[in-house]
Amino acid sequence: MSSKSLTLSNISKRFGSVTALDNFNLEVGVGELVALLGPSGCGKTTALRVVAGLEHQDNGTVLVADKNISEVPAHKRNMGMVFQAYSLFPNLTVEENVAFGLQMRKVNKTSRLKKAHELLDLVGLDSQSKRFTHQLSGGQQQRVALARALAFEPEILLLDEPLSALDAQVRVNLREEIRRLQLSLGTTTLFVTHDQEEAMSISDRVGVMNNGVLEQIDTPDALYNKPSSSFVAGFVGTMNRIPAQIADGMVEIFGSKIAALKRGNESGQVIALIRPESISVIADSATPNAKVLTRSFMGASSNIVCQTADGTIVQSLMTSASTGDLHPGSSVQLRVLSSEVLVANA
Amino acid sequence: MTHKVIEEGAPTRGRAFLTSFLRNFLPATPLLLIVGFFFLFPIARLIYVSFLSNENTFTIDNFKTAVQEPYRTGFINSIKIGLFSAALAAFPGAIAAYFIETRGSSKLRRTIAVMSGVLANTGGIPLAFMFYAALGIQGQLTKILKFFGWDLYAGTFSLGSFIGLLVVYMYFQLPLMVIVFSPAIVSLRREWSEAARNLGANQLNYWIRIGIPLLFPSFIASFLLLFASGFSAYATANALTVGNLPLTPLQIGGLLDGNVSAAQLNLGKALGVVMIIISACAVIPYLAIQRRSARWQKR
Amino acid sequence: MKIKLQPPLAITLLILGFFVFVPMISAFEYSIRTPLTGGYGWTHYIWAVTEEDFLHYILRSMWLAGVTVLITLFVLVPTLTWLHLSNSKVRGIIDGLSLLPLVIPVVAFAVGAQISFPEFVQNTVLELPFLYFVLALPYAYRALDIGLSAIPLKTITEAARSSGADWLRTITSVIVPVIRGAVMATIALTFALSLGEYTLTVLLHWDTFPTWVTYVAQENILGAIAISMMSLILPFLILTIITLFVPERSTQGRK
């Protein structure tokens, strides 16, 4: 069964007085890995569960390719799902778990165990096939869960924070594995997470959600460099928020005038959004405009936190070599390196 | 900064060994002393005396008598009532537990848990009164049933008969089942039924392949505990029967109360030991199964 | 998300309710009958409560139960705390020992008790709380064990000790409040078990409230019914009401 596209149109879902999804729209292309990223309670898991059929939407439709599956019960939707944890059946062995989807589709025992082994091999766990859940580590369990979700070649793969319960190192390895598998199988995938590094590193596109609404969906690059809202800017990566005056489409920051993106001829007070790597810190300058508060050595780069005269905290990311002689208390000059900046309302 | 309670690595020499041994043991002494004196000692003595004849010599005659009439019938009746009351209460109790735990609100579940706790401990005279009032010859329910055409007392039924006792035992066996089986229901994770649905299983498939296999051991374990409860019940049987129904707990009680046949002073002890053996045959497997199930039931 | 009363649940509760309450209500109805005047009244209850033995036996049972609770808490809380903290090898043995009373039928235990204890023990009613303690042990031990397992015991103990608290203060001021739920449950079940214990008590020829009711039944059946009703319905109602109206304190998030 080859993968299909997934479309959510105008999905709304309320739980009592809480609106989990508010006119939510999403399109995932064939073979694409789209991540839904956002803080707890933003609705990303609800959206995923609506797709899976585990929650029923109040309004809107779910389409797979062109087929409307909004009223199709969960067990007939032909989607593979990986849950956050504890989803393997404890009374079945690893291989029986993986073969379960095929068993439900009436595949005979030899064939389905063979397919199970193929997938366990893909995730590197063939040797554990006769074991039980409680004998495996968290990372191993999730790999089995992944194999189980893919065994019956689903049209869509759904992942609900599959790595959140795992150790940091396991998380990094496993997310790479998920991406590799997804690419080689070409499965249309929807991946829910609250970890922005996770989402950005493996997705084709990332959708940032807040309060039941999709704020922006774009490639990781675009999200990082061209966030469309203050929320997205702050959620993805670190962002400096520097108060500044705007006039005629130019903002004045650290003594220079820089073009403001997407602003007309307004004037007044705004907040300039600038990434740490776009701010440089210059020591021994004739015109210092800030004092260093801390310097965090992170190997190749260092994070310098400074404070300007008006009290604004500014973070700068520079190579450690160029900041070697900076220490708390040093007077420095801050400069913006980019030629245009994002601006948000004050 | 931290205060270590126990040292790592037990030393093996002299004074250090003694200190380590004491540290490993001493705080448990109060508990061990009480349990030892008030529990282990009486049981040990029971077993010991059961092998003594009237002249304090070793004998197995007590046991020989214990397995003959009328005690034999007593055992058979007691085992029967244990099995039947367990069987009658197990399914309804399991189903009730299922609906309560999966569909009930948190408040409802807690309330039922407390009520079940009280009801499971109901017995003896109060319970007998309640059933005399409801199902006795002049009972309210009896009158209502008669009105609808069913004369309970047309045949040989009486509350002190085997069937009558069975009905009354339900009053505490059912709540006991709910109490003992509910943890198993609770530990059925939502993820399993959702994963099963996602993988293509409808409700029936889920229950056949996942739900029931997981619940089965706990169900059997609960049944075993119910058997032990019905088998060992004394107060209720004492209140309802009038000597017409031989039951082991009652026979032992009779022997204790001074109706001692001079023939065998220690017969009651032997009966007690056999009772312990039968009870252990149920309770020990119960404990073993629960321990195994705890593996996947951990939340 | 509120879960409404669904049909299967409602039916289950209805059937259970019928089964549980019909005998209770029938007996209650009996107990408020006044044969002499032909109507209903509280005659038997008034009679029961004004019987001088009533107060005597109720107080006796209550203080016996109270002593049992004290023994249970004073012995189990420190011992279990120590077991959890020290990882002693004895723990497995004690865990097993705590379950043993479940295996032994109370009647058999009564026989053993009757022939084992020296005179001075047999003659004091104080043997009862210790025996009740043994009977309640499987439940009390487990309740406290689970309670202690659910908290970061080692961490809070070390925090308390390093702040200068001695063991007594650590247990009473730090640990017990944290496992408050388990302690309350232990107190409730131990108290209830001791208050209602009949078999062991009667076979050892002691007189407590439950056994007194049996005695009363021989003379004044309606009065005995009234007493039984009180000893049954009152705790039932009180506990149910408390549970319904006390807000639940969740110490851990449940998934």
Image (tube, rainbow, N blue to C red):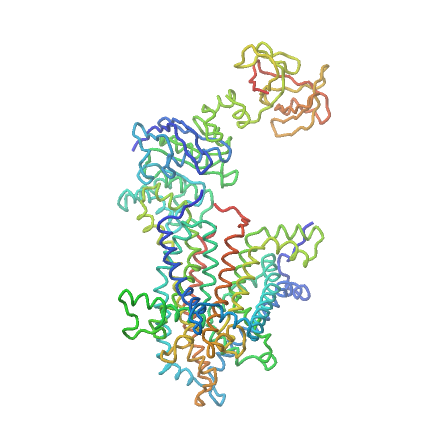
Q: Position of residue B73 (x, y in %)?
A: 35, 79
Q: Is residue A194 above or below residue C222?
A: above
- Tell which of A64 and B162 is nearer to you: B162
- Of residue A216 and residue C57, the one placed in the foreground of this image is C57
Left or right of residue A321: residue B212: left
Identify which residue is drawn at 54% across, 50% down. C247
Q: Quadrant of residue A56?
A: top left
Residue B41: x, y in percent? 54, 76
The residue lying at 26 percent from left, 66 percent from top is B149
**In the displayed structure, would residue B201 be above or below residue C102?**
above
Work out whether A8 lies above or below B283.
above
In the displayed structure, B81 sits above or below A19; it is: below
**For this rendering, which residue is in front, B148 or C43?**
C43
Viewer-closest of B14 and A51: A51
- Corner quadrant of residue B160: bottom left
Name the residue located 47 percent from the left edge and 25 percent from the top edge.
A215
